[in-house]
Image (cartoon, grey):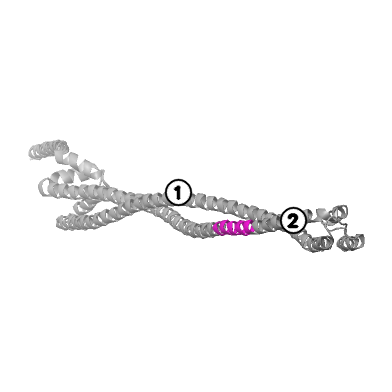
Amino acid sequence: MKSIVAITLVLCLLSNQVLSKKHNQDEEHSAFEKSHKKLALSDDPAYGKLEEIQDHPLGSKILQTIALQLRGNESLSAVSKLLNDLKGDLEGKQIDADNERAQIGSQCKKDLQNYSQRISLSINEIKDAEFKAKRLNEAIAVYQAEINEKARQIKVFQAKDDTLRDIRRQDNLDFSTRTTQMKEMVQAFEVILPKLHQVWDVAAAHKAGSFIEEEAINEALVQLAKIGEENPITAMVALTSTLEPTAVQTLIEKMEAIRDSIKESIQAEEEAEAKNARDTDTILAAIFNAIESLTREKASDEEALQETIRNRDIQDKRSRDAHAEFNAAKNGNQQRNQQCQEYELQYQQNTIERDKQIAIIKDVQNIIATKIEVVTCFVEENNLF
């Protein structure tokens, strides 16, 4: 009986040892299979894709969310819905961004065209203003030259006028001096000749060859002498007093001839003086008319000059305003172009990032749907639990 018990105990021990060894062998086999499976899963292309996805901020967050779901043994349907919603949100944002880009692009095009048109117009305005200003400056130079020339001519005519008037005054003074002297001589002849006729009449009253009474002759000569010492004829009186009475007739005839010649000279002088005065007045009138005409033309040129200067100043202001507009449009065009380029660059960057995020979501959805074991393996290997 004891032998049977002993045998039974030995068999039990042996059986336990066998079972324990088999259990250990099963665990080792299971661990090997798991290790082999993990190795196989890590070699899967999806595993490498998950590694790429994890390097992206959005992909990392998605994998962490999946790990939480797996750790709680929960369904991944919520994750799938979240991914669908996230992908739809990104696609919607891309559509909005595309629409916004189209609007902003259109506005940029209009703004740049507007700036380009302003630049073109300002350049044309500058060219036109500078061309007109140049022509007006040339006209100003011509007006100034004309005004200076007319002023010079006026000055010359005024000098001629002054000179001619001085000559006329001197000629008139000389005429007055000459005619006064000649008239005094005529006046003296008019005084002496009657006295000489008286002497001759006394002499003729006596017999031929007789002498004139000395007393009558002396009386006539005394009256002639009373004319005055300053009278030009005084010398004639003195001469007459030395003549024989019979020679007086010859003297009278010669003196009358001289008197008449002086009268003719006076008349000729007066006519010449009148003609000279008329000629001078004609020349002075012509000079006056020339000065008046030049003065009017000069005043007209000065008025035209001021008007031309005002127009030139207007063109200069146009040019300055056009330059200011050109600079403003040029700067505005550069700033707007930079804004549009920066917006386009940002749009491209956002689009690339958004496309990458959508691609990540699609890759995760595809891997979850087809390679969940790879996902689980990746989560475990990267300690995302």
Amino acid type, callout 1? Glu
Q: Given the current orientation, which residue lies at the most extreme right position?
A: 215
Looking at this view, is 351 or 25 the one in front? 351
Few, some or many residues within 10 Å of mark 1 (<14, 14–19, 20+): few
Q: Main secondary structure of the magenta part?
A: helix
Few, some or many residues within 10 Å of mark 2 (<14, 14–19, 20+): few
Location of the N terminus by quadrant is: top left
Looking at this view, is 71 or 354 the one in front? 354
- Numbered tag placed on residue 95 in the rendering: none
Q: Which residue is mark 2?
A: 253
Number of on-image labels = 2
Image coordinates of residue 308 in percent, x first then y, are 46, 56
The first of marks 1 and 2 along the sequence is 1
Question: Is residue 327 at all visible to an observer of this figure?
Answer: no
Q: Residue at x 78, y 61 (%)?
A: 193
Looking at this view, is 202 or 270 the one in front? 202
Magenta span contains residue 275: yes
Looking at this view, is 98 or 102 the one in front? 102
Magenta span contains residue 297: no
Amino acid type, callout 2? Glu
Q: Which residue is mark 1?
A: 138
* Local secondary structure at mark 1: helix
Give the side of residue 379 with respect to residue 326, left or right: left
Is residue 284 positioned above or below 53 on the image? below
Q: Residue at x 18, y 41 (%)?
A: 49
Image coordinates of residue 13 in percent, x first then y, are 13, 38
Give the side of residue 194 with respect to residue 304, left or right: right
Magenta stretch, residue numbers: 271-286
Q: Quadrant of residue 200?
A: bottom right
Image coordinates of residue 127 in percent, x first then y, are 37, 49
